[in-house]
Image: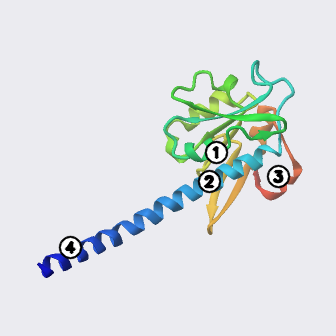
Amino acid sequence: MKTVTTRARVAIALLLLAAAPLTGAAEQIASEHAVKAAIIYKIAKFISWPAEAPEGNQDMLPICLPAADPIGPALESLAGKTVQGRTIAIHHFEEAGTLASDCAILFLSQSATLRRPALISNVANAPVLTIGDSADFVEIGGIVTLEIKKNRVTFAINKGASDRAGLGISAQLLQLATVRN
């Protein structure tokens, strides 16, 4: 009986050790998403949208993202906060047909790889701040890309894309970013 108990304890200990790295990785990813959500919130404070917001959105600052995006829970924590007198609302979408009139910010993570160019193109000439987290995001027409380098989140800005969208970006924010055209 003592041998079975010892074996059971060893098995449980091995299971816990095997699960520990997974838990750490999950916590690290959740932390990464929380940091990115906080940066998105701070970046929004340095953006000037045209005075004429889409009808029904004068008091709202809608942040849109694909329904299954893993950053969703972290972005949900921004709901109800205000930026420039507008209240943040989070919108998850399945299809991108009406994004231009529905969003002030469109977040596209690496998980939306196949659809990113089409989604960016859909809002390219609308006052929508496109933010992504893949290295090529600004090259494919996105406005801001968040990158992790040496455990720090950095960002690049596509100034040409922001100009086409009619968005103003604070000089203070541009000084902190890598600016690309």
Q: Earlier in the sequence, mark 3 or mark 4?
A: 4
Residue 26: percent from the left, percent from the top?
47, 59
Identity, as a three-letter code, of the amino acid under mark 4: Ala
Q: What residue is rendered at 76% in x and 34% in y? A: 87
Q: Nearer the viewer, mark 3 or mark 2?
A: 2
Residue 181 in view of the camera: no
Residue 104 in view of the camera: yes
Q: What residue is rendered at 69% in x and 51% in y? A: 38
Element assignment for label 3: helix
The one nearer the camera, 3 or 47, is 3
Residue 158: percent from the left, percent from the top?
74, 45
Residue 2: percent from the left, percent from the top?
14, 81
Q: Residue furthest front?
A: 1
For the residues marked 3 and 2, what is the alpha-carbon distance in whole angstroms? 20 Å
Q: Earlier in the sequence, mark 4 or mark 2?
A: 4
Q: Which residue is mark 4?
A: 8
Q: Residue 164, located in which quarter of the rendered image? A: top right
Q: Which residue is mark 3?
A: 173
Q: What residue is rendered at 81% in x and 32% in y? A: 166
Q: Which residue is mark 1?
A: 77
Q: Which residue is mark 2?
A: 34
Element assignment for label 4: helix
Identity, as a three-letter code, of the amino acid under mark 3: Leu
Q: What residue is rendered at 62% in x and 69% in y? A: 150
Q: Which mark is residue 1?
A: none
The one nearer the camera, 89 or 113, is 89
Q: Residue 93, located in which quarter of the rendered image? A: top right
